[in-house]
Image: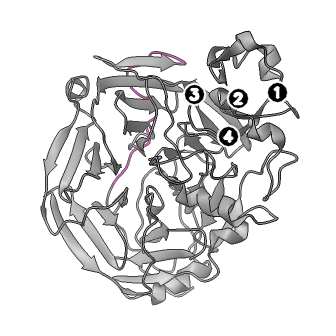
């Protein structure tokens, strides 16, 4: 194999991640929670995570290498060989250029027979994605409300440049038609599609239009639910990849077909066993918002709709709650895993407004205003609706994409924006409802990966 210079980072396999009233979606309504101090819920009451995976932002050059060492704290992630079909294309890309990968449209991986609207809204209906760095692949999960019932996890593997479905629809459903039971929204409060042809629920077991969520695990109701078929959802910025668990994790909410309630728990898909399980009961309100993974492999979440700032300790299956946000985030964000800061690029018309959480400052996180406004300078991106905004481990930069050939880099040490306009293949405009986590950085190959819609294919940007 010919020599290459590749960005390699010794770090855990990082991953992360509004229903806007108009169009096919709606706003999920959930109970609001707040906290004046950190409160743990779940398997135990540990104050800190027992996960120990660390990170470094050093970049290393490798020549004549055919494979990567493991990049995950979990031994099941063995790294990605660097002699796959995409690598020659990346080698040939000039610096500061875009490339449309051939035959990389997600529509080709949607269930048959194809219903284009149901497929398209897996991305366009306020939905995001996360990234499994150990396998160098993007994981897309979306749909929800009246848009798409597809609850498949779609994976784009960068090396072979292929889309696959990692999970399948419930028995009896196909790409064009859900089962009648899937259309019954009464079980949305439990978060699962039914396992029966028709639900049998007593009136006294209902809470308004939905099954009382406190009864979802009662034997007679649980027997009617397929716990391996979580409902499709508007996912916003809420999907994450848990590197210490080798699992896809979604915080829940915005379910098909009504999106007016939510389950009290999130859902984890374990790649080793190929099975779904529930998380511990979530604290407070989990509506729209943004989740991201820290250097220890824990997920932090800031909601768009008030409620507490929270952490999910993946190894313990437990939640910590901090100060109440009491504001509308309306943005996208990621964690600077070098400095342990969660920065959000706000969607409020001010292109320079960045809001930050100092994750090591627990006292501040417990306060009534657990965030700070970050004063940035330089050539900042123009405002947009949930633009792509990701921390690039190895580059030590946040990177924003809001359409076209322009990429904006924010140095977290100086808080200065710089602007690059790439050449090559011009990406199409971002989807109206937001990019969320479908703009990621491959630490293995040193390129940004953009899945903008199901039809146009996947774009790479080489900084």
Badge 4 element: loop
Callout 2–callout 4 Cβ contact below 8 Å: yes
Callout 2–callout 1 Cβ contact below 8 Å: yes
Camera-side mark, 2 or 3: 2
Q: Residue at x 22, y 36 (%)?
A: 371
What separation in Å lies between label 4 and label 1 (alpha carbons)? 15 Å
Q: Earlier in the sequence, mark 2 or mark 4?
A: 2
Q: Main secondary structure of the magenta part?
A: loop
Q: Earlier in the sequence, mark 4 or mark 1?
A: 1
The numbered disc on residue 265 is 3
Q: Residue at x 56, y 36 (%)?
A: 252
Q: Which residue is mark 2?
A: 187
Q: Which residue is mark 4?
A: 231
What separation in Å lies between label 2 and label 1 (alpha carbons)? 9 Å
Name the spot of residue 42 as percent of width and height, x first.
52, 19
Name the spot of residue 410 as percent of width and height, x first.
22, 62
> Which quadrant is the C terminus positioned in?
bottom left
């Amino acid at each position: 194999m010919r020599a290459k210079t590749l960005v390699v980072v010794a770090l855990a396999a990082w991953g992360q991640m509004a229903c806007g009233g108009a169009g096919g979606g709606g706003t999920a309504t959930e109970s609001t929670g707040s906290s004046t101090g950190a409160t743990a819920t779940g398997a135990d009451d540990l104050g800190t995570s027992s996960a120990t995976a660390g990170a470094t932002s050093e970049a290393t050059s490798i020549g004549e290498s055919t494979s990567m060492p493991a990049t995950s704290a979990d031994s099941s992630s063995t790294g990605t060989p660097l002699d796959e079909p995409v690598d020659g294309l990346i080698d040939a890309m000039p610096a500061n250029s875009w490339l449309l990968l051939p035959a990389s449209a997600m529509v080709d991986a949607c269930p048959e027979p194809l219903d284009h609207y149901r497929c398209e809204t897996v991305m366009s209906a306020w939905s995001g994605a996360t990234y499994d760095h150990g396998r160098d692949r993007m994981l897309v999960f979306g749909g929800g409300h009246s848009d798409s019932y597809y609850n498949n996890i779609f994976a784009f593997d960068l090396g072979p440049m292929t889309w696959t479905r990692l999970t399948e629809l419930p028995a009896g459903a196909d790409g064009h038609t859900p089962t009648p039971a899937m259309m019954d929204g009464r079980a949305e409060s439990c978060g699962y599609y039914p396992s029966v042809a028709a639900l049998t629920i007593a009136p006294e077991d209902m809470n308004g239009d939905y099954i009382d969520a406190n009864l979802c695990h009662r034997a007679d109701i649980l027997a009617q639910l397929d716990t391996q078929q979580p409902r499709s959802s508007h996912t916003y910025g809420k999907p994450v990849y848990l590197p210490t668990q080798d699992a896809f994790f979604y915080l829940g909410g915005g379910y098909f077909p009504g999106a007016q309630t939510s389950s009290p728990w999130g859902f984890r898909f374990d790649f080793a066993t190929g099975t779904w399980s529930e998380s511990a009961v979530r604290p407070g309100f989990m509506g729209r918002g943004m989740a991201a993974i820290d250097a220890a492999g824990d997920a932090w979440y800031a909601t768009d709709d008030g409620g507490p700032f929270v952490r999910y300790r993946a190894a313990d299956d437990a939640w910590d709650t901090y100060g109440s946000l009491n504001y509308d985030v309306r943005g996208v964000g990621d964690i600077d895993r070098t400095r342990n800061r969660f920065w959000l690029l706000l969607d409020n018309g001010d292109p320079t407004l960045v809001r930050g959480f100092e994750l090591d400052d627990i006292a501040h996180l417990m306060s009534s205003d657990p965030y700070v406004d970050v004063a940035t300078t330089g050539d900042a991106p123009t405002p947009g609706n949930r633009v792509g905004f990701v921390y690039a481990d190895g580059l030590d930069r946040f990177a924003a994409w809001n359409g076209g050939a322009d990429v904006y880099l924010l140095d977290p040490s100086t808080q200065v924006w710089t602007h690059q306009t790439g050449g090559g293949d011009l990406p199409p405009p971002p989807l109206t409802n937001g990019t969320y986590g479908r703009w990621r950085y491959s630490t293995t190959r040193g390129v940004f990966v953009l899945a903008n819609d199901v039809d146009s294919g996947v774009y790479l940007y080489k900084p």
